[in-house]
Image (tube, rainbow, N blue to C red):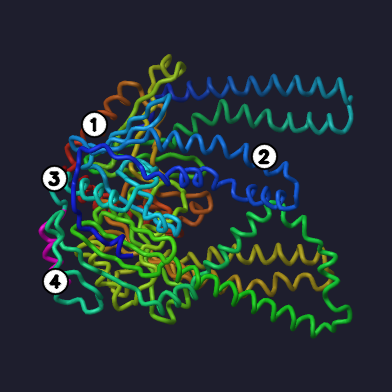
Amino acid sequence: MYSLDTNFIQVEIISGAIFTFFVFCFSLVGLVVLWATVGLGLLWYLAFGSFVIILPLLLYFTFAWPRIEFKHYRWRLDDQSLEIHRGVWFRHRISVPVGRVQHADVSQGPLLRRFDLGKLIIHTAGTANAQIELAGLSHNVAIQLRDRLVEQTQTKVVT
Amino acid sequence: MNDLNNFDNKSSDVAQLSRLHWSSILFDAIAQIRGLIVPAVLLLLGAARGESIWLMIGAVAIVPTLIVSIIRFVTLTFQINNGQLVVKHGLIFRNVRSVPVDRIQNIDFVQNPLHRLLGVAEVRVETAAGSEPEATLRVLKLDQVEQLRAAIFESRKQPLVSATADASDFELRSTQTDAVDSTDGVADRIDERPVVTLLTIPTLWLFYAGLSSNRGVLLVGVMLGSLYEAKMFQRINFERLSQLFPKNFGILATITVIALGIVVVMLALRALGIAWYLLRFHGYCLSRKGDDLRISCGMFTKVQATVPRRRIQFISVQRTWIMRLLGLSSVRIETASTGGNHDDATKSVSSRWFIPVVSNEQLPGLLSQIRPGLVWDENKFDYQPLSARASKRMCRLAYLFAFVLSAAGLAFWRPWGFLFGVLALPLLLLMIRQSVRATRYARTSEGVVFRSGVFTVKTSMTFFEKIQSLQLDQSPFDRRWRMAKLSIDTAAAGPAEHQIHIPLLDEAIALREQQTIKQLAALHQPVFG
């Protein structure tokens, strides 16, 4: 089984940090507004308390979680199927047998492009797993994988 | 009935430009305002009370609808040209849709009483792509329907049926005894494939099916829902209603009245279910022509649906407890084109109630027609149970639940509140035991069978070439117990209301099954036709 590209961790940390930063700013503004309008009452202490509890959680999920997530993310393609293992608390193992990939896309946002990563999106004819994402591959690998998947489908399908 | 089953065509003016029937304006307008039926009724009620303002609002609202419908009628043309069905419509924005005839999978049509009065039908053309019908022609005259159908089937170059299926045709005719009204001799003029009647359902069976279904409950639920939305309940004066009951009723009398009331309601619900089944499936006929299965049925609203056999992804045999007593089953199927959540007539007949009721003896023969060569011997499948510890795990949950229930009960009603939990516990334990025991799966040479359910037993099968992906899930609790859930995903899963999610498997076994099924799925490649 292969891991994702290690750059995945950085991308996750950066996007998480942006989110955390915004939440932090909004909370501060909220606390100040609350203080200015209602004053230092019970409500303010409740709000402050939840802020104090939520902040470390946010920091944990921003800076520590990507590494843990990375550790549990694995994939493999052989001549039988594409396998994806992911999930830390809730573990999932998805297998897509050969010939079931309808089409596959590689997409790249600005952040992913900067780190030369790509997100592979695999479409099957299924229902629950109609779309399977494999984020955080290096762009090259994502494109190779896409080409192999499509090729496999084309050679295997009887027309 | 006969007008629907009349397949033979007279002309096939293929390239001719055709138009909808004039009554399309009416039906299109009806379809547009169908969602507004409750407000419309309220409007009429308002108008009836002499508030003519409501009538004016109604009139103003209906004008744009009518204009849209008229434009659609005037501009819509369709024709079959170079193997393409081309539908054009639109005044300002011209829409042109061409559907390759080879790709057309289903041509379904619906006729409600109003349609029949005018001799027209609504036609839906479906391809493999996507959830919506590729083209809906609302409405065509019946001979136009026949022309279209003939043209489409003529343009299809080769019948998609294999040699083995034809052989099984022959077998069927020599062995089948229950098939009524077999149209053996009549070879169709469109192609050589004969129409074989597979099943007709006696009215008595429909009666049983209605009796054993809880369709009535659903119908009443839908009705109450729309009444609630229309704020009808607010108009009921409950105080005046309560004055209707006698004041000095003893406890015993009250209980008797309530019990009687419940019985009456239950009977009424069942009767409603029976009526629904009798109306919907009146004159049910399942037939096969080459690779296409055809269902036609309905007393007032007639439906004819076509299901290409090779597109069946999933077969589910379901039996409520009354059906099991009577030795009957119902069959639901899923085809790749059953997407969308419309509960419209053709869809519900062609997937949800594919075969509303059939005897257990006829079932294996019928299923081997629905999927050529399918061996359906339910009691000889190599069923595997869930984990041996599954009951234990679920029972622990039950103990916890009973404890919480007791604690909550005690908080509200001292000292007897704890009895809630104590009384609920045995019931819970029994349910868990039964449902764990009822849940099992099997691998056959063709696919995976999954059975579950205590009251309504559902036995479903999908086939290796139809499996799109497999997923193994483990929650933190699963990992603690070293268990896992295995799910098998197929196209357009859902309408059969039974999906293959096998919970509470031993981890090692689940992993092994996933590997094995995955390998078998890789060996059996899907065939697109």
Q: Which mark is residue B171?
A: 4
What kind of element bears circle 3? loop
In the figure, is residue B346 to the left or right of A51?
left
Disc 4 + disc 1, Cβ < 8 Å: no
Relative height, residue B178 to residue B525 (above, below): below
Residue carrying label 3: B157
Quadrant of the image containing the N terminus of chain B? bottom left
N-terminal of the two: label 3 or label 2?
2
Mark 3 vs mark 1: same chain? no
Q: Chain of mark 1?
A: A
Residue at (30% x, 21% y) in the render = A140
Relative height, residue B314 to residue A19 (above, below): below
Residue A143: x, y in percent? 29, 24
Q: What's under tag 3, amino acid-wise?
A: Lys
N-terminal of the two: label 4 or label 2?
2
Q: Which mark is residue A148?
A: 1
Residue B169 shown in magenta: yes
C-alpha gap between disc 4 and disc 1: 44 Å
Q: Chain of mark 3?
A: B
Q: Answer yes or no: is residue B506 visible.
A: no
Mark 1 vs mark 2: in front: 2
Residue at (23% x, 65% y) in the render = B369
Residue B239 shown in magenta: no
Disc 3 + disc 2, Cβ < 8 Å: no
Residue at (46% x, 48% y) in the render = B341
Mark 3 vs mark 2: in front: 2
What kind of element bears circle 4? helix
**Magenta region: which residues?**
B161-173
Residue at (40% x, 30% y) in the render = B90
Mark 4 vs mark 1: same chain? no
What kind of element bears circle 1? helix
Residue carrying label 2: B57
